Image (cartoon, coloured by chain):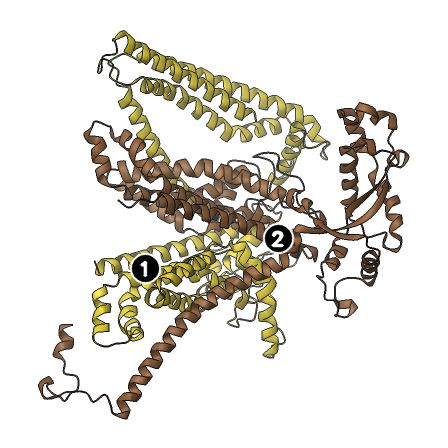
Amino acid sequence: MRLLIALALVLGLAGLAYLAGRARGNRMVTVAGGRIGAVHSRPVYHGAYVAVLALAPALVVLAAWGFVSETLIEGQVLGSLAGAQRPASGNDSEALMNEVRGLVNGDLPQAFNPLAPRLAPVYAAARSNGDMLAGALAVALLSMGGLWGWSRLRPDFRARNRVETQVRALLLLASVVAILATFGIVLSLIFESIRFFQLVSPVEFLTGLHWSPQTAIRADQVGSTGAFGAVPLFWGTIFIGAIIAMAVAIPLGLMSAIYLTQYADPRLRRWLKPILELLAGVPTVVYGFFAALTIAPLVRSFAVSLGMTNASSDSALAAGLVMGVMIIPFVSSMADDALAAVPSAMRDGSLAMGATPSETVKKVMVPAALPGIMGGVLLAVSRAIGETMIVVMAAGLAANLTANPFSSVTTVTTQIVALLTGDQEFDSAKTLSAFALGLVLFVMTLILNIYALAVVKRYREAYE
Amino acid sequence: MATLAATPASGTPIAERQPTDWTTPAMAARIAARYRAERNFRVAGAAALMIAASFLAFLLFTIVRDGSTGFQRSEARIEVQFDAATLGVDPAAVSGSKGAGPQGQAVLARADYQALLLKAAAQLGPADDTLSDAAWMELRAVLMDDPALLGQRTILWVPVRSSIDLLAKGKYDMTAPAESRGVSDREVSDWRWLAREGRLRTGLNTTFLFGADSTEPELAGIGGAALGSLLTLAVTIAIAFPLGVFSAVWLEEFAPKGWLADIIELSINNLAAVPSIIFGLLGLAFFLNFAGMPRSAPLVGGITLALMTMPVIVIAARVAIKAVPPSIRDAALAIGASPIQVVFHHVLPLALPGIMTGTIIGVGRALGETAPLLLIGMRAFVTDVPQGFTSPATVLPMQVFLWSDDVQRGFVEKTSAAIMVLMVILIAMNSVAIYLRNRFERRW
């Protein structure tokens, strides 16, 4: 909250700096008698130049403080405790700090931890000291930058060029965020995975057939080590995402695309296409709810009617079916693009030879478009295996290595969610294994995407 | 094609072949088979579309069937005597103008409405245990609204328990045997009594629309989650829109060909394809554990979703910027505009409709996203509307997820109703996007 006030103050002062710079620019124009070209830049650029010089350092200070303040203050508050009183684990100190923060903010009428009321004033003092210091530093830098910029303004000062350089730098900075995000993802996944692989060997993780991450709390309990063989998870992911879902999505998506592009008359097409797109716009949590509540019982009673006594209520089939329907519009639009890229001469040639439209599609268009369609299917597979909510809500948690679609299997994404929601130590192999699973998922989807895009690109170039 | 022409069809030179006799029965059968195959293929195509469309229709139908009653609630009529003694309120403290003042209101807010409700419920005879826990809040709201009612008798409609509510809406299969229909005989007889006495009616469920989460289905609302979604999306838009547009401008207009542009482009394409749950892992490992940001907060959720939305905006904005013809740029440059002025005065305004369309689609996707938010703790059980960007909150799709997990029967209806609200918002957003595209899209 105080940070927001500081931000508003800094922005307000920068606004003043802008006005001062612009006023000086205006005066220079008046002194020069309003002659065009007497002053290099228009007054607004003088104002913007001063404002940017004032604002940039102050914002950097505030952002840095907002980023590190909590950690610094926490260290200071916990440091004020005598060694023996300090919370033993990271979780305990986190809980204590939450109580302290609650007391200071007034969210919490009374603390459970007897230490919290003692620490509250320390926290409040540290926070207000730090905020004041950071605020003062920001305002000081702001005034210095603003004054320096203001003092540089002359009629022949190239304010516009400077401002434009600054704007270009801003644009570049915005672009670099994408790199930072990618690096952040890769680094955090790799970093946590390395910690996991110090506890469990990568070979066991990638080739083990038994998955039961439930480590016991005490070392002497049964099953205290847990088992981290992820093969059943990989199989479940592929079974649901790449086999069942694709068995639904490829025929339906491909046939929809063929019908829409080759047969449907434009008026019908104008109506059908948005309906298909609506299927892609439904939030995945809605599909998950539908799969769990409506489709899963249907699938189960179907299995029972087939004579299966142990049919699971969270079967792979229910999740896979719904996921397949979700992917239909994706496959359909990729196939649409691929078919549209086939040169019309090939299609016209086939029709002119007397082939029926369906023969043209089956024997000429689809074979010609096959690389493009395959690329689209691979992209769809990468979408399906990364899909989370449907499998979390409709697939099970039992890591079975089975090809029976009516039994329960689990997937990588289901396990990530199961491992990371709920309270646990962040250092345990159980929690860290989620990041190793995430890394595998990331690498798998990345390879699929790069390969699929390369296929699609090569295919497009072949017909250009 | 050349090879095809050179290959004789049946081994004989083309010049010596007789024209095909189309009238033979074999040929006629062949043609009929080909037309049949044609028809079947066409029907198969239409059937594929029909299956997809009917799945969507079935989904929407079940959601609306289960959810439409979620906006209503059943209310029971009771006569309440706002008795000062039962309430434990000193009449003098709230009489006259004081009743409306802050002190009078504070006294009224603290009064013992549960005792009052217990007394009033006695008039329901055998069905005295049918009123919802929300009923006393209703009494409080009525009295605080009009303190002059103190000491008066008045007739009020207050919400009933979830089981009675569901009975009134016909959500139980009454033909099923008593032990498997999910509702006790006592509740059924209570409901029958209330209905017979004419004490039941159906009203608008304002608690559902404006309230926050609760363990009781009849008290649970989506207001808190909707506000949480709003706060989260505000953060998402504030970060993703400028970053996305600026990146697109830089890549399209200023990026020198080279490794930097290549890496940025690769990163953006990669971010667009990464499964959403990976962003949740990033949020957990980096924002929560490394940077120490608060759990369950709209701020962190918004930043995480912004990283997911940004590539969508970048890709849409690049297409829109590319579509602006070079003649516009050349004309502006020719009369002395600088490259930055060309972009900000001419290219961006012309590309704005396309950028807005992409932004709305990206934000719509962020609104329906659940998986990454699960990992950063936005599955919190929050019984109050969120206070700010750093206080615990939940979002609409997460509320759907949380309720769908709840075993209580009454939550099925609430979940479906929440999905209806979510879908209406999403469809409205997409309609705006399509409208913008059609209204402002220019063909150059």
Q: How crowded is mark 1: few (under 14 residues within 10 Å), some or many (20 or more)?
A: some
Q: Which residue is drawn at 63% across and 56% down?
A: B67
Name the residue at the top extreme. Answer: A31
Q: Quadrant of residue B380?
A: top right
Instruction: Identify whether A377 is placed above or below A186.
Output: below
Q: Quadrant of residue A280?
A: bottom left
What chain letter is assigned to the residue under label 2? B
Please indicate whether residue A282 sits to the left or right of residue A262 in the image: right
- Provide residue A425's location: percent of width, then percent of height: 60, 46
Chain B representation colour: brown
For mark 1, what is the residue? A337
For mark 2, what is the residue? B417
Please indicate whether residue B268 sits to the left or right of residue B411 in the image: left
Instruction: Identify whether B241 is placed above or below A242.
Output: above
* Chain letter corresponding to the colour yellow: A
Q: Residue at x 21, y 73 (%)?
A: A352
What chain letter is assigned to the residue under label 1? A
Name the residue at the left extreme. Answer: B15
Whether callout 2 and callout 1 share a subunit is answered no
Q: Which amino acid does label 2 sit on?
A: Ala
Secondary structure beneath dot 2 equals: helix
Q: Residue at x 53, y 25 (%)?
A: A3
Quadrant of the rendering where the C terminus of chain A is positioned: bottom left
- Provide residue A225's location: percent of width, then percent of height: 59, 56
Observer-nearest of B164 and B435: B435
Can residue B138 be seen from the camera position used here?
Answer: yes
Can residue A378 be seen from the camera position used here?
Answer: no
- Provide residue A53's location: percent of width, then percent of height: 37, 20
- Provide residue A232's location: percent of width, then percent of height: 51, 64
